[in-house]
Image (cartoon, rainbow, N blue to C red):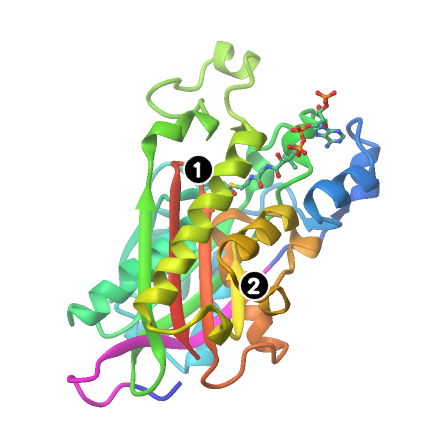
């Protein structure tokens, strides 16, 4: 997208995209050897066929860095000129310092203000909306948003109800004011009353690491899949409807719908509820599983790379995650 020229019509758009996933593929057949499950069960309940898993020692900042380099190159932005760097992640390298500071150091983005954002699977949409606000108010002139996760480090590989769902990866975008297109509408929401349905109990101040916390397997993610399923459908559909309305378009004018890549059944239900054309939905969860905060940006990257999204297309991104959190963006490409 061309860069912004006049203040009056200021909109924020995407100048470059990047993604990175680990090489190692873990298929449903591999999982059959690890827990009591079948390829048929996983495909029919989730749509997932395989996911990428980071090698031991590979961190979230490693994946984030690779995605960032590509996005900056595509945007033709020298890291030295970057002003804001936000990383959305639930799986930071460490509790502190922020993963964004670690990536800043590797990029040599010395002028960037850096922080991490915690919104679970809604992370990249939350971070894009946050960056948009800083860019709209003129505080910064450009921003790099990254969603990155090494979820495999926090998965109980003996729990078949969660270990089949998730994968590792990173997606990134460079955002700045644009002269044409860009973000037309946004929506965000949260509901802490449902926090108990998806969480990782250990490692924070509630259950600091101890022999007992390890014995109780508190350092792995936990999820009530059935509850999350129901809430995800309603929240994502309502949020998507709100940005479509705000953007003053009709559902049939959405050329590409990029939902959080968690589960085909959730996505099909969202599309039905929000009255969106099913043929406009972009899905790559069959290859990556649920990559949490990285999922929407990885999907956007591939949809653009593969020519699914074309110039002037209306794109709706919608996400849902633990918290609960949800959010949507309507943008014109
Ligand atoms: N293989 C075989 N059987 C399994 C597996 C497995 N991997 N996992 C669970 N089962 C069994 C259960 O034990 C249960 O058996 P039982 O009836 O004997 O007790 C049976 O399958 C049905 O279990 P349900 O949980 O009712 O299955 P459901 O149809 O709800 O599908 C699933 C489970 C796929 C997890 C679904 O609930 C779901 O997708 N939920 C949303 C999860 C999700 O996408 N979360 C991430 C989104 S939010 C975010 O990203 C932060």
Q: Which quarter of the figure is the C terminus placed in?
A: bottom left
Q: Determine the residue positioned at 55% across, 33% down.
A: 154
Rate crowding at label 2 as few (under 14), some (14 to 19) or many (20 or more) other CA atoms within 10 Å.
Answer: many
Give how far across and how far down residue 194 sits, in percent: 39, 29
* Quadrant where ligand 1 appears: top right
Give the residue number, with chain letter if any, for mark 1.
322
Q: What span is in magenta? A: 4-20
Cα separation, mark 1 vs mark 2, equals 20 Å
Give how far across and how far down residue 185 sits, in percent: 31, 67
> Is residue 63 shown above or below 214?
below
Numbered disc 2: secondary structure = helix
In the rendered structure, are the residues bearing label 1 and label 2 in contact, judged by CB atoms less than 8 Å apart? no
Horizontal side, residue 13 vs residue 268: left or right: left
Magenta-drawn stretch contains 77: no
Q: Is residue 232 visible?
A: yes
Horizontal side, residue 30 vs residue 277: left or right: right
Magenta-drawn stretch contains 17: yes
Q: Determine the residue positioned at 57% across, 36% down.
A: 153
Horizontal side, residue 146 vs residue 167: left or right: left
Query: Is label 1's Cβ within 8 Å of ligand 1?
Result: yes
Give the residue number, with chain letter if any, for mark 2.
299
Q: Nearer the viewer, residue 280 or 259?
A: 280
Give how far across and how far down residue 271 sits, in percent: 55, 57
Sooner in the amino-acid sequence: mark 1 or mark 2: 2
Q: Nearer the viewer, residue 104 or 310?
A: 310
């Amino acid at each position: 997208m061309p860069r912004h020229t006049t203040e009056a019509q200021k909109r924020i758009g995407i100048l470059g995209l990047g993604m990175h996933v680990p090489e190692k593929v873990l298929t449903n057949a591999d999982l059959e050897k690890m827990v009591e499950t079948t390829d048929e069960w996983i495909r029919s309940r989730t749509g997932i066929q395989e996911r990428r898993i980071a090698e031991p020692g590979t961190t979230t900042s490693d994946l984030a860095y690779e995605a960032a380099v590509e996005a900056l190159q595509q945007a033709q932005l020298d890291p030295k000129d970057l002003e804001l760097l936000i990383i959305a992640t639930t799986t930071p390298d460490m509790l502190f310092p922020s993963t964004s500071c670690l990536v800043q150091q590797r990029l040599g983005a010395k002028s960037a203000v850096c922080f991490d954002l915690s919104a679970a699977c809604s992370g990249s949409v939350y971070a894009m909306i946050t960056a948009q606000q800083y860019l709209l108010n003129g505080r910064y002139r450009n921003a790099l948003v990254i969603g990155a996760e090494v979820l495999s480090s926090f998965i109980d590989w003996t729990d078949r109800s969660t270990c089949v769902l998730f994968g590792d990866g990173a997606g990134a975008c460079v955002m700045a004011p644009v002269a044409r297109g860009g973000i037309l509408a946004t929506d965000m929401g949260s509901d802490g009353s449902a926090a108990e349905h998806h969480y990782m109990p250990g490692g924070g101040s509630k259950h600091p690491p101890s022999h007992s916390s390890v014995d109780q397997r508190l350092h792995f993610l936990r999820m009530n899949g059935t509850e999350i399923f129901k809430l995800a459908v309603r929240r994502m559909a309502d949020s998507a409807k709100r940005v479509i309305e705000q953007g003053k378009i009709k559902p049939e004018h959405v050329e590409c719908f990029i939902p959080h890549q968690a589960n085909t059944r959730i996505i099909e239900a969202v599309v039905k509820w929000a009255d969106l054309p099913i043929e406009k939905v972009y899905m790559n969860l069959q290859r990556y599983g649920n990559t949490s905060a990285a999922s929407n940006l990885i999907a956007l990257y591939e949809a653009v790379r593969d020519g699914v999204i074309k110039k002037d297309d209306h794109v709706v991104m919608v996400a849902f995650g633990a918290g609960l959190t949800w959010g949507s963006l309507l943008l014109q490409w």
